Amino acid sequence: MKRVHWSSREMSAYLKREEDISVSRSVIVRIWKEHDLQPWRQGTFKLSRDPECAEKVIDIVGLYPDPPDGAVVLSVDEKTQVQALERTQPLLPITFSKNEKRTHDYVRHGTTNLFAALDIATGEVEGKCFPRRRTGKFITFMNEVTRRHADRELHVVLDNLSTHSGPEVDAWLDAHPNVRFHYTPIGSSWLNQIEIWFGIIIRQDIRRGSFGSLRIPVDTINAYIANWNADARPFAWTAKPKEIIAKVRVLQRDYKRLITNNTK
């Protein structure tokens, strides 16, 4: 019998019924704790199938602690489909005895797309909202970003979205010889530090809001960026390329072994 979600009660009953083994719930819980097992929890994973994964990891992660002399390293991406959701009832604020509460139902006033660039040396963020995510909008945003660093060598870390490559982007790069793009391995956008910042602004600012129009979340995002930059600090990236590659290879090995066993 295969069970997706085990509890100590269910496992105790299963062992008694199927294996004729009497094990109390407390013993099962103790064994789980001793071996750091949490079978009631689930996570997600995604393995990169990029044949150049190791080379790209070394390239990008090497830029974070040791960029070329005088160069600026930017982490760039888009947070798409940021929704302007207006809650149908006022938010109930936190008290000493209750958590903050909001209604599940809402009115949707459209979406915006946040383009953002994180300077990995200073932690400062430059961002702009666009109604759509298109290659033309990406180039417009990059024009504004590179204008601030026109006299510097610029290295830009990007993921593999279609808006980040193609003939228009190639032509733009030819016109900006001081800019070099570094693409994360396919399925590994988490290597891009801007993803950390996106998680912060969504968690702290956007997800908790109630927006009566599309203009309000755009203004909220702009204000958040201004406040962030007033006290910006770089993220401390500690993972080394060899460590990342080793973990990826372990996952690939375990995944291959699991698939092989399930097909026997």
Image (cartoon, rainbow, N blue to C red):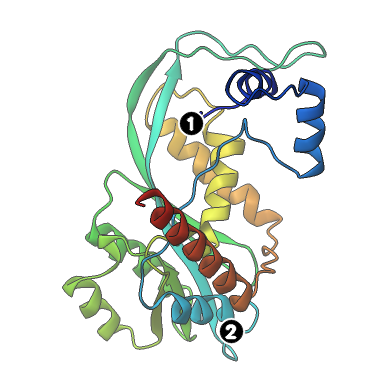
Q: Position of residue 164 (x, y in %)?
A: 30, 66
Determine which residue is flagged by label 1.
2
Using a 10 Å C-alpha cutoff, classify the residue at mark 2 as few (fewer than 14 neighbours), some (14 to 19) or many (20 or more). some
Q: Is residue 87 above or below residue 140?
A: above
In the rendered view, does 88 fall on the left or right side of 233? left
Q: Earlier in the sequence, mark 1 or mark 2?
A: 1
Using the image as rendered, state which of residue 224 and residue 17 is in the foreground: 17
- Front of the two marks 1 and 2: 1
In the rendered view, does 21 fall on the left or right side of 106? right
Question: In terms of image quadrants, where is residue 36?
Answer: top right
Q: Position of residue 184 (x, y in %)?
A: 42, 69
Q: Residue furthest front?
A: 20
Amino acid beneath label 2: Pro
Amino acid beneath label 1: Lys
> Tag 1's secondary structure?
loop
Using the image as rendered, state which of residue 215 and residue 135 is in the foreground: 135
Identify the residue shown where x is 68% and y is 18%.
Answer: 9
Identify the residue shown where x is 78% and y is 36%.
Answer: 31
Q: Position of residue 6 (x, y in %)?
A: 60, 27
Determine which residue is flagged by label 2.
67
Using the image as rendered, state which of residue 224 and residue 59 is in the foreground: 59
In the rendered view, does 147 fall on the left or right side of 29? left
Identify the residue shown where x is 41% and y is 67%.
Answer: 158
